Image (tube, rainbow, N blue to C red):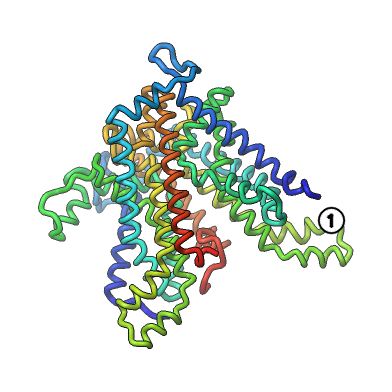
Amino acid sequence: MSRNGPVALLYHALFVVFMVAPIVVVVWVAFTPEGYLSFPTDRWSLRWFYALARYPEFIAAFWRSLGLGALSSFLAIAVSVPAALAIGRHRFRGREAMTTLFMSPLMIPSVVLGIAFLRFFTQIGLGGTFVGLVLSHIVIVMPYALRLTLASAIGLDRSIEHAAVSLGASEAAVLKRITLPLVLPGLVSGWALAFINSFDEVTMTVFIAAPGTETLPVRMFLYIQDNIDPLVTSVSACVIAVTVAALVALDRAYGLERLLVGRGSNGR
Amino acid sequence: MKSTPYLLALPALLLFAVVVIAPLGMTVALSFHDWGQYKGIEPVFILKNWKEVFTDSYYGEMFGRTFRIALLVTLITAVFGAPEAYILNRMKSPWRGIFLLVILGPLLISVVARTLGWALLFGGNSGLVNKALMSAGLISAPLPFMFTETGMVVALSHVLMPYMVLSVWAALQRLDPQVENAAVALGAGPLTTLRRIVLPQAMPGILSGGIIVFALAASAFATPAIIGGRRLKVASTLAYDEFLNTLDWPLGAVVAVLLLAALVTIVVVANWLVERRYAAVFR
C-alpha cells in the first residue's frame, strides 16, 4: 500500500477540519457560561445543560423521539423480514419493482413525502397524532431496515439449515437454534441504523408533527427559526452525544464501513 | 408454492400501498383543487395553480435558485470529496478506519445540529469563517454568509459531502493497487497515473455520488431554511410556507409535484447515461 505525500496529508487535515468544525463549534458553545452566544469562549459551565433540564418541551420531545425511533424501527424490521425472505430467496414476477418500491422513500424528496403524509393523515383523521408519526417513520426507515435484513437473508448459508433438518431438527428448532441466531446481528444493526435515521429525521416530520407530538429535531428546528441561543446548542450537544454513542456501538458490532458501503469491509 | 413470495411481502406491500402510493396520488389530485382564503380547499378540477406557477416569474426564479444551488453543491463535493476518498483509500489500516468514521459519521448526526454549527461559524460579519478567511489573506472585507446563497452552498456541501466520499470510496475499492504500481513501473509519472489510471476508475463513483448529492441538495429543507432565513426561498422551503403559513395547500402541492417530477426525470436520465457509459462496471 503506497503512502500519501505531505501535500495529500495537508489536504486531508484541512478536509477533516472542514468536516468536524461545525460539530465541534456546537458542542463548544454549549458549555459557555454566558447568557448569549459567545465564541470562542475559554471558560466552561454546565449552565445551559441545567437550563435544558428545566425546559419541559425539549425533554418531552426527546422521550417522544426515542420512543418513536424505537417503535417505528422495530415495526419496520418486522415487515422487512418476510419481505426480505421473499426478495432474497425467491425469483418471481415483479421482484425488481417491489424492491424499487420499498427503496423509494430514499428517492422521493422528504418534503414531498411530508406534504403527502400531511394531506393523507388530515383526510383520514390521523393528523398530528402519534400513530401518524409511527406509520410515516416506518416508511422512511424501511429502506435501511430492508437493506440489512436483505443482506442477512442472502448471506445466510442454507446448507446449515438443511444439515440441521437432516439431523432430525424440527422446523421450529431450526428457526430458533439456527436461522434466528444467524440473522440476529443483521436485524439488530438494521434496527439501529433505522433508529438513528428516525431519531434525526426532521424534513418530513416537520410537516406532520403538531404541538404535543413534536419530535426533538422538529422542536429544535422550530426553536432555531425564532432564536439561536446557547440553549439550542446544549440540546444539539446531547443529540450529537446520543448519535455518536449509537455510531460507535454500531461500528463495533457491525462495522460502519460495511453498514454504509453495504458490503464486506476491506482490510479489517 | 408460487404465491409464497407475494404472501411474505404482503404486509410491506399493503403498508406502502396505503401509506405511500395513496398519499402521493392524493397530493397530485390536491394540486388541481381550488383554494380561497375563506372557503378553504374545494375539491374541483382546475388548472389555476399550475398556470400560476408556470406564469409567475417568482416561481421560475425560485426553481432556478434551487437547481443552481444543487448544481454548485454537486460540483464542490465532487472536486473536494473525490481526492479525499483517494487519500483515505491510500491510508494504512488503523488510520483509514478512524478517518472514515470521522468523515462519514456526520452523515448520521442531526442535520439541524450540523446546520446550527454553520450558523454559528458564519455568525454575521465577525463570524469565525470570515475571521479565518481574512487572516489568511483570501478576502479583504467580510463576506455575507447568513441569508445568502453562498452560505447555503457551503453548509449544504458540508452536509452532503459524506455521500460523495462514500460513493467514490466504494468505486476505488474495485481498483487493484497493482495496476497503479504497474503504471509507475512502466515509467508513468504520478500525475499521469492519476489521470490515466485512477480517475477513469473513480469516475463511476463520482458520477453516481453526484446524482445522489444533486437530488438531496435540490430537495434539502432544514439547511436552506435555517441559513436562508425567511426571505431566501428554495422549492422545499416555499412548499413548507404554502402548507404551514399561507395554508394554500393546492399551490404548495404543485411545487411539490413539480420538484418530484423534475428530480425523478433528472435522476433517471442521469442514471441511464452513467450506466450506459460504464455498463461494464455496474454488471
Q: Who's the residue at 31% across and 79% down the image?
A: B190
- Residue B186, located in which quarter of the rendered image? bottom left
Q: Who's the residue at 44% across and 80% down the image?
A: B179
What amino acid type is highlighted by mark number 1? Glu
**Residue B247 appears in the picture as rendered:** no
Residue B130 position, x and y percent, is 18, 51
Q: Is residue A162 left or right of residue B264?
A: right
Q: Who's the residue at 40% across and 74% down the image?
A: B90
**Residue A228 appears in the picture as rendered:** yes
Q: Is residue A47 left or right of residue B167?
A: left
Residue B153 position, x and y percent, is 29, 48
Q: Nearer the viewer, residue A239 or A154?
A: A154
Q: Residue furthest right?
A: A168
Q: Nearer the viewer, residue A119 or B50?
A: B50
- Residue B260, located in which quarter of the rendered image? top left
Location of mark 1 (residue): A171
Q: Chain of mark 1?
A: A
Q: Is residue A208 left or right of residue A159?
A: left
Q: Who's the residue at 46% across and 17% down the image?
A: B41
The crowd level at tag 1 (other Cα within 10 Å; few <14, some 14-19, many 20+) is few
From this view, report whether residue A60 is shown above or below residue B71: above
Q: Is residue B203 left or right of residue A84?
A: left
